[in-house]
Amino acid sequence: MKKVLGSAAGAALIMVSSLAQANGYIGVNYAQLEQDDRFFGGEDFDTGDVFVRLGGHINEHFAGELRIGTTLESEEDTGAGLEFRHDSVVSALLRLQHKFGAFQPYAVAGMSRIDETLDTATSSSSSSFNDVTFGAGFDFALGDKFGLNVEYLQLSDDAGVKRIGPSFGLFMNFY
């Protein structure tokens, strides 16, 4: 927990510094995260999660990013009375990027804190954990300020349960 909070504080300082110099961005992404099934009797299931991304460009090749998200589409088994969701996901990430005109590919890595809940017909249980997050993607500029984002992310691999999947979104630059 202390490492995640320290990483988030460091990322926040980098972003505040960068935003003050007008090199920041904000975005929103929808991720379809697949994970190994621990609850529903299948091989895997997915949740639909939304993330707000706040970032700051450190220089032309590096950016710091803070992501905060939650589940929009929980996994449910109404017959068994089960529902699984991510209550919150907070990630502090560093991006390595290079711009080729309107196209900017990148790799991202950092730490995430994930809070999840499983509701049953009679009870509710919650768990929290921290794990390494990494992925790759690209931004596609639609002009000076706005653009599209596509990414494939492994949010975590906690106790052999991977949370992995594609993400699509929009972003706005502050410069």
Image (spheres, rainbow, N blue to C red):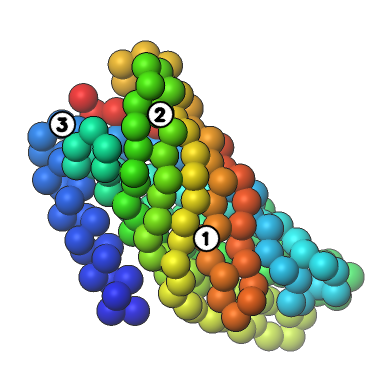
For marks 2 and 1, give the CA distance. 21 Å
Establish if 69 lies above or below 60.
below
Residue located at (35% from left, 37% from top): 97
Mark 3 or mark 1, which is nearer the start of the sequence? 3
Which SS class for mark 2? strand
How many C-alpha atoms fall within 10 Å of the one at disc 3: few (<14), some, or many (≥20)? some
Answer whether labels 2 and 1 touch (C-beta < 8 Å).
Answer: no
Left or right: residue 81 versus residue 152 is right
Q: Nearer the viewer, mark 1 or mark 3?
A: 1
Q: Position of residue 71 (x, y in %)?
A: 58, 57
Q: Which residue lies under the disc numbered 2?
A: 104
Residue located at (19% from left, 37% from top): 59
For marks 1 and 3, give the CA distance. 29 Å
Q: Position of residue 142 (x, y in %)?
A: 42, 16
Residue located at (23% from left, 70% from top): 6
Which SS class for mark 3? loop
Q: Amino acid at mark 3?
A: Ala
Which SS class for mark 1? strand
Q: Which residue lies under the disc numbered 3?
A: 22
Q: Nearer the viewer, mark 2 or mark 1?
A: 2
How many C-alpha atoms fall within 10 Å of the one at disc 1: few (<14), some, or many (≥20)? many
Q: Which residue lies under the disc numbered 1?
A: 155
Q: Amino acid at mark 1?
A: Leu
Picture quadrant where residue 58 is located = top left
Q: Amino acid at mark 2?
A: Gln
Left or right: residue 49 versus residue 129 is right
For marks 3 and 2, give the CA distance. 19 Å
- Residue 52 in view (yes/no): no
